[in-house]
């Protein structure tokens, strides 16, 4: 943009005389001033961490100016925007963005920066430098080579974020996905589904602390339930069965990189939802007793429940420090039930952040949003839901993961046999 200074001088000289970036001038109308857009610079912070190259082409960035009532008064492309504009006296904000962000998109990192300025009567205002930072969520899905050898052709991982963004990853997908981070919606959900060694597997994972500027790298790998490492062919002891391990690395692309890898809960495939220990990893510390509780007067969390307890299917949830998230993950070995539930509500959801499913959840009697966040206790009443299981023989699991305001978590699983 600095190359345009000569042009600006020529234009202003026609009506104002020779001008520098700080000179005053005679306005066209009363109570107005000028903004020297040609003097505005745009910088992209830490771009090489996001796109793996030294720079980003800023010419196509969008520049938008809003007044103090948040009304759009100017909208341009950075590479072709006017060199100077006249605005009424007042306070303004300039937003600079790489593109109009979408709920989900492939290989399209979103950069955003903002700066305020004031227009003074009969003065020329310089905005200065606007620094744009990576402001969406980057997600990469990796399939370990040993696992890839035993995957069926139908395997996919569906990633969902914000209120409606979704992308489907296959084992051959090399691109990263980018998601808008919506205020009040901080849950990222991944659903692994498909055939592994001839068995249908379905694993649902939900992460509840999504923020702009993060890069979530989720890795799926193969192991045996006993923790044995497969051989080079991906084989494990056939009498021992198999498990799929899910782990993730979280990088902050706007600052320091977090090189620590957190191994999450063991696989949630049918028959293993109640497992709470990973033999390869130390058991995480248990929250202080009484800090978070998930209880039921009639239902068992240790063994399957019969449908005869459907009229007593009430779960009491409490958190001493206030509830932050209540993630519900539904798994089943009945494909018809899975399809029926999918038509009614997601197989994984957060009651604290219901999105566009708010009305559906509340019609089932579930608390949502403000009736969950910050509350010391809530009731999760599934008495209307359990009778639906009668038409679908099999094992159905409802895993509840409660997070409090200090990021302590507790998970318990309800299992029903029908």
Image (cartoon, rainbow, N blue to C red):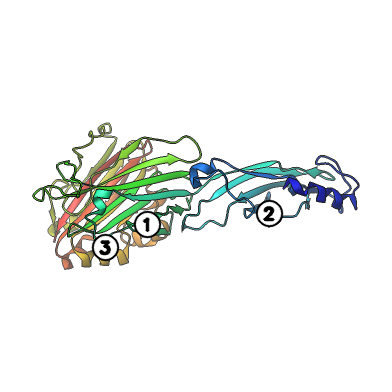
Residue at image mark 3: 153
Q: Tag 1 or tag 3, which sits nearer the N-term?
A: 3
Residue 361 shown left or right of residue 69 in the figure: left
Residue 234 percent coordinates (x, y)? 20, 49
> From the viewer's perspective, is residue 277 above or below residue 140?
above
Residue 200 shown left or right of residue 21 in the figure: left
Give the residue drawn at x 18%, y 45%: 230
Checking the image for residue 46, the label placed there is none
Residue 343 percent coordinates (x, y)? 31, 67
- Between the residue at mark 3 and the residue at mark 1, the CA separation in whole angstroms equals 13 Å
Q: Are marks 3 and 1 in contact (CB under 8 Å)?
A: no
Residue at image mark 2: 79
**Residue 392 quadrant:** bottom left
- Foreground: 218 or 346? 218
Residue at image mark 1: 173
- Foreground: 131 or 305? 131
């Amino acid at each position: 943009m600095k190359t345009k200074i000569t042009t600006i001088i020529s234009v202003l000289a026609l009506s104002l005389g020779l001008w520098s970036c700080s000179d005053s001038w005679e306005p066209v109308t009363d109570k107005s001033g000028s903004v020297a857009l040609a003097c505005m610079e745009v910088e992209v912070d830490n771009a090489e961490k996001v796109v793996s190259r030294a720079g980003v082409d800023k010419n196509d960035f969008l520049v938008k100016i809003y007044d103090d009532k948040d009304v759009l008064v100017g909208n341009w492309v950075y590479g072709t925007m006017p060199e100077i504009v006249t605005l009424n006296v007042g306070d303004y904000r300039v937003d600079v963005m790489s593109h109009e962000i979408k709920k989900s998109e492939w290989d399209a990192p979103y950069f955003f920066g903002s700066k305020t300025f004031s227009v003074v009567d009969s003065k020329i205002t310089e905005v200065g430098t606007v620094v744009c930072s990576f402001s969406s969520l980057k997600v990469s899905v990796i399939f370990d080579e040993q696992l890839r050898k035993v995957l069926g052709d139908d395997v996919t991982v569906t990633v969902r974020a914000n209120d409606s963004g979704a992308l489907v990853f296959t084992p051959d997908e090399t691109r990263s996905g980018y998601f808008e981070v919506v205020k009040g919606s901080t849950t990222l959900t991944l659903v692994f589904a498909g055939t592994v060694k001839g068995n249908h597997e379905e694993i649902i994972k939900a992460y509840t602390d999504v923020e702009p500027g993060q890069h979530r790298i989720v890795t799926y790998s193969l192991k045996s339930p006993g923790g044995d490492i497969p051989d080079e062919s991906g084989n494990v002891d056939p009498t021992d069965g198999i498990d799929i391990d899910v782990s993730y690395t979280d990088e902050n692309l706007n600052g320091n990189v977090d090189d620590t890898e957190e191994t999450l809960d063991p696989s949630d495939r049918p028959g293993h939802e109640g497992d709470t220990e990973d033999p390869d990893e130390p058991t995480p510390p248990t929250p202080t007793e009484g800090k978070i509780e998930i209880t039921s007067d009639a239902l068992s969390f240790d063994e399957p429940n019969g449908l005869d307890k459907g009229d007593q299917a009430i779960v009491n949830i409490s958190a001493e420090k206030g509830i932050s998230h209540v993630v519900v993950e539904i798994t089943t070995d009945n494909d018809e039930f899975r399809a029926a539930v999918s038509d009614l509500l997601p197989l994984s959801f957060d009651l604290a952040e219901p999105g566009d499913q708010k009305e559906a959840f509340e019609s089932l009697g579930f608390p949502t949003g403000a009736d969950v966040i910050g509350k010391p206790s809530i009731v999760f009443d599934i008495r209307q839901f359990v009778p639906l299981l009668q038409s679908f023989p099999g094992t159905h699991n409802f895993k509840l993961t409660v997070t409090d305001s200090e990021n302590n978590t507790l998970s318990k699983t309800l299992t029903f046999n029908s």
